[in-house]
Image (tube, helix red, strand yellow):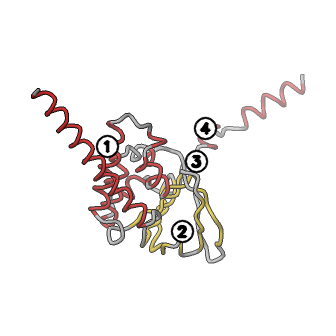
Amino acid sequence: MLGTVAVALSIVACTDNWDEHYNMGSPYDGNLWEAVSSNPNLTNFARVIEACGYDSSLVSSQMFTVFAPTNDYFTAEDANALISVYNEQKAKHVKDNDNMTIKEFVQNHIALYNYSVSSLSNDSIVMMNGKYLPLTSSFIGGSQMSSSKTVGNGILYTVDGCNIPRMCLNILKKMQTLIRLRASFILSISMSSSRH
C-alpha cells in the first residue's frame, strides 16, 4: 500500500509535460529558406534552390548547414545555366539523385546537420552529395566564408566563392548548349521527314 501511494505521489508531483520538455524548439527564429531567400546577396543561389525544389527541404525541421555563394561569385548567367540543365534533365525523366544540377551544385553547397566553426576549426565535412570539403574557421572548400546566420533548422554561411569549380560550371553550360543543339537537330530531322 505504501508503495502504491509513493508511486501515485511521484506521478502527481511531476507536472512537466513530456512533449514540452523534449521539444523545446530552437532559440533561433526562422528557417534556412527564409534566411537564403530574404538575403539580397543570395538571389541567384535562391533561384537555383527553388527551381530544384530544395526550398521545401530548407523549411523542414531537418538540420542543415548551407554554404551559399554570393551573387558576386555566382552570377545570374550561372544560375540560368544550372536551372536550364535541371529542367532539361527533368523533362527527360532523370531522377533527382542523378540530376547534375542537384548532384554537382545544390548538394555540394548543403551538409546535413549543424557545422559551426571556430578559430580551432580545421576539418573536412561531408556534403549531401557525398563529397568531402575542407572546413576551417574562415574557408570552405577553398572559398572564404564572409558571414553566418544561425536559424531554427541550421546555419547559413555566405561564401565568397562557389563550391563547384568554374570548370564544372563551364561543362554544365556546354552540356546545356549540346542539349539545345541536339533538340534542334532532332526537330529539323522530324520536320524534314514529315515533308516527305
Q: Position of residue 18 (x, y in %)?
A: 65, 37
Mark 2 → mark 3, Cα distance in angstroms: 34 Å
Determine crowd level at label 3: few under 14, some 14-19, many 20+ residues with C-alpha closer than 10 A: few
Looking at the rendered image, the disc whose residue lies closer to the viewer, 1 or 3, is 1
Residue, disc 4: 19
Q: Secondary structure at mark 2?
A: loop
> Above or below — where is 2 with respect to 38?
above
Q: Identify which residue is drawn at 41% across, 46% down.
A: 54
Q: Amino acid at mark 2?
A: Gly
Mark 2 → mark 4, Cα distance in angstroms: 40 Å
Residue, disc 2: 141
**Residue toward you, 14 or 20:** 20
Give the residue furthest to the front: 196
Q: Amino acid at mark 1?
A: Asn
**Residue toward you, 78 or 139:** 78
Q: Earlier in the sequence, mark 2 or mark 4?
A: 4
Determine crowd level at label 2: few under 14, some 14-19, many 20+ residues with C-alpha closer than 10 A: some
> Above or below — where is 96 with respect to 109?
above
Q: Identify which residue is drawn at 24% across, 41% down.
A: 183
> Above or below — where is 34 with respect to 95?
below
Q: Position of residue 188 (x, y in %)?
A: 17, 39
**Residue toward you, 163 or 58:** 163
Q: Are marks 4 and 3 in contact (CB under 8 Å)?
A: no
Q: Which mark is residue 192?
A: none
Mark 1 → mark 2, Cα distance in angstroms: 27 Å
Q: Are marks 1 and 3 in contact (CB under 8 Å)?
A: no
Q: Earlier in the sequence, mark 2 or mark 3?
A: 3
Looking at the rendered image, the disc whose residue lies closer to the viewer, 1 or 2, is 1
Looking at the rendered image, the disc whose residue lies closer to the viewer, 4 or 1, is 1
Q: Which mark is residue 24?
A: 3
